[in-house]
Image (spheres, rainbow, N blue to C red):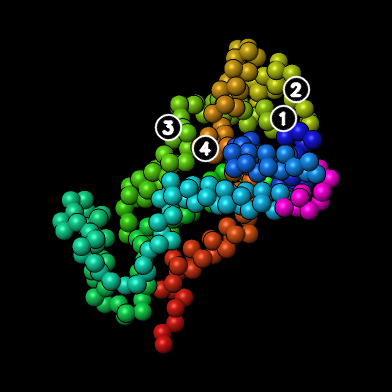
Amino acid sequence: MNSRDIKARLERALHKPITPAEWLNLQHRGLVDEYSRNPLAYTDEENWREFRDSARRELDFLRQYREDSTQEQAGDLEDVYLDHSVGYQIDDSPADPEDRASARRYALGALNALRASETAPSRAAVDSMLLPRGGVDGTLPQWVNIMAVELWVPAEEVAEKHRRKQQAMMTEPDPPKTRARAFNVARFVWELERHYGERPPWPVMCERWNNFPLARPFKSWRDFRTNFLRGAKATPPRYVASNEQLTEQVRVHAREQAGLFHYWARGVLAATVQQPE
């Protein structure tokens, strides 16, 4: 049994795929070599179970670390360690911030601390978290940025916080500007392909486009195809994590992520749901 066979058997036993990077990590850890060097490795079930359980623990640790690292890059991990007690600690903030939004936020924090009871939770004016979705149902996997924003916060500040997450999680936060015409052609082709079960010939699709009411016609089907290729390339977002990695996070951690979202939402709405003593 070679390394590929061992990987395939382990994937069947764990009921989940193992990415090339994850398999390389198991090899670096020496688990694969230690298992394969045993003369009874392929016939001794006890030896197999020990290898399987060790590999599962290592993969769980690796995937959890990767998830934590992703949250850290997006600026969310530090929220786990925040002290949610109400206390206005002036040493933690600049004495005289220049921008109006920060100055107002600190002033609002001081006012809340003055008026609040000791049991009232502290709240961020802008709170957010990232969760993956899609992938497992055939759709493209996506990062979703969920934000809770107090209404007074300037829209520009909200946009900037969202922008920073895009820069951390996307390989092309500023993709080349693709014209709407290219996206429209890509949509048109994909809708035809879905309707007929296969993609019609390019001249046929171009003729149907040209006959569509109010559509700007193409001079040739080759121009039509060129626009499709541009739109098809620009449509899917490009994340630092691969589609396979995002899909795996959805598949493996869906239940945990749902719990994380509810925990986050409870924290955001803590002051709303708390009842007076």
Residue holding disc 1? 192
Question: Which residue is found at the position 35% from the left and 60% from the top?
Answer: 125
User: Residues under labels 2 and 4: Cα distance?
Assistant: 31 Å
Disc 2 and disc 1 in contact, CB within 8 angstroms = yes
Distance (Cα) linking label 2 and label 1: 8 Å
Residue type at mark 4 is Tyr
Disc 4 designates what residue? Answer: 239
In this view, the residue in front, 110 or 40, is 40
Q: Is mark 4 on a helix, strand or loop?
A: loop
Circle 1: residue type: Leu
Lateral position of residue 36 relative to residue 88, left or right: right
Q: Counting other residues with Cα less than 10 Å from the Cα at mark 1, is it few (<14), some (14-19), or many (20 or more)?
A: some
In the foreground, 5 or 277: 5
| First of labels 1, 3 by sequence position | 3
The residue beneath circle 2 is: 200
Label 4 and label 3: CA atoms lie apart by 12 Å
- Is residue 107 positioned above or below 13 on the image? below
Question: Which corner quadrant holds the C terminus?
Answer: bottom left
User: Magenta residues: mostly which secondary structure?
Assistant: helix
The segment highlighted magenta reads: 42-50
